[in-house]
Amino acid sequence: MIECAVWWAEPLPNEPRYLDLLDSPERGRHGAYRQEIDRRRFLTGRVLAKTILGERLGLAPGSVTFDATCEDCGKPHGKPRLAGVEFSISHSGDRVGLAVTSVPVGLDVETDSRRADDSLIAYALNETERQALAPLSTQERISTFFQYWTRKEALMKATGRGLKIPLQSITLSGAELIASGHEALDPATTRLADLDPGEGYRGAVAALTADELKITETWWTP
């Protein structure tokens, strides 16, 4: 059994007490966002991760430094990493999430009120999955689509490959990977679980392991 802890938070204000926890590259990324809400989401993800991981490692939040070097271009905008722990950050709307465990992990959260037109559905889902949506009402169709989306995003984040893995190469049945056209995802060594980020949101976590997952979800306040 693999334990996976998930924390949910709402975006923090852009205040010095939180901004002081960012290192120089993180300050650069924070300042590059044009919208205040985007800066707040980024800030919250980093503060949440530094706080929770710092507690686990016996470090003050300001002493936790992530390596976010992009493997493609070398710039500091890649997936944050920290030696000795596996974690994933995601945010959407007024939700910021952190998943922490001992194996490669991916977390995704999305609002389920966004528009999901036929082109987006065709981009993300293969024929088998699109057929499962066909008999649903419009609202059920949109909500179910974003559950598919979060599951697939979580899977891709767990591999570290992101959108290099075509979404249509992944076939899901509920919260289970049943087929994959990419070598980075093997149904035998992949676990997937739906989460509860609150009304209006869909969430999922994926882990690259053959063991079962034990999920805990906690709301975090600073």
Image (cartoon, rainbow, N blue to C red):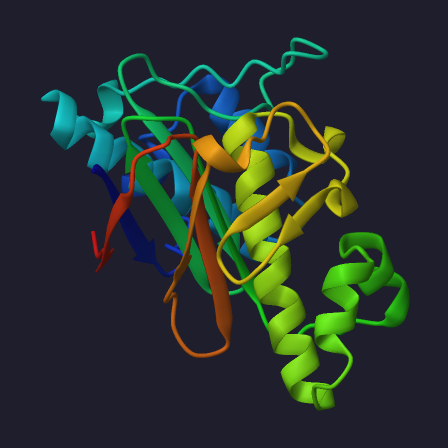
Q: Can you give x and y, in whole percent of width and height, for residue 127 in the image?
A: 82, 60
Q: In this view, does 106 lie above or below 12?
A: above
Q: Residue furthest top?
A: 74
On the image, the x and y values in percent for residue 64 come to 27, 20
State the residue at coordinates (46%, 24%).
80
Instruction: Choose between 17 and 52: the one closer to the eye.
Output: 52
**Residue pictured at 64% horizontal, 43% vertical:** 179
Is residue 206 depicted above or below 220 in this figure?
A: above
Q: Is residue 119 shown left or right of residue 152? A: right
Residue pictured at 72% horizontal, 11% vertical: 73
Quadrant housing the N terminus? top left
List the single residue furthest toward the bottom. Answer: 137
Residue at (64% x, 57% y) in the render: 149
Judged from this view, the residue extending furthest toward the right is 119
Residue 17, quarter of the rendered image: top left
Q: Nearer the viewer, residue 25 or 189?
A: 189
Q: Which of 99 and 184 is in front in this view?
A: 184
Q: Position of residue 176 (x, y in %)?
A: 50, 52
Q: In which quarter of the image is residue 103?
A: top left
Left or right position of 121 against 210: right
Q: Is residue 99 above or below residue 29?
A: below
214 sits left or right of 141 in the view? left
User: Where residue 89 sits: x, y (%)?
Assistant: 44, 40
The reply to whether residue 6 is in sight is: yes
Residue 113 shows in this picture? no
In the displayed orientation, state which residue is furthest to the left. 58
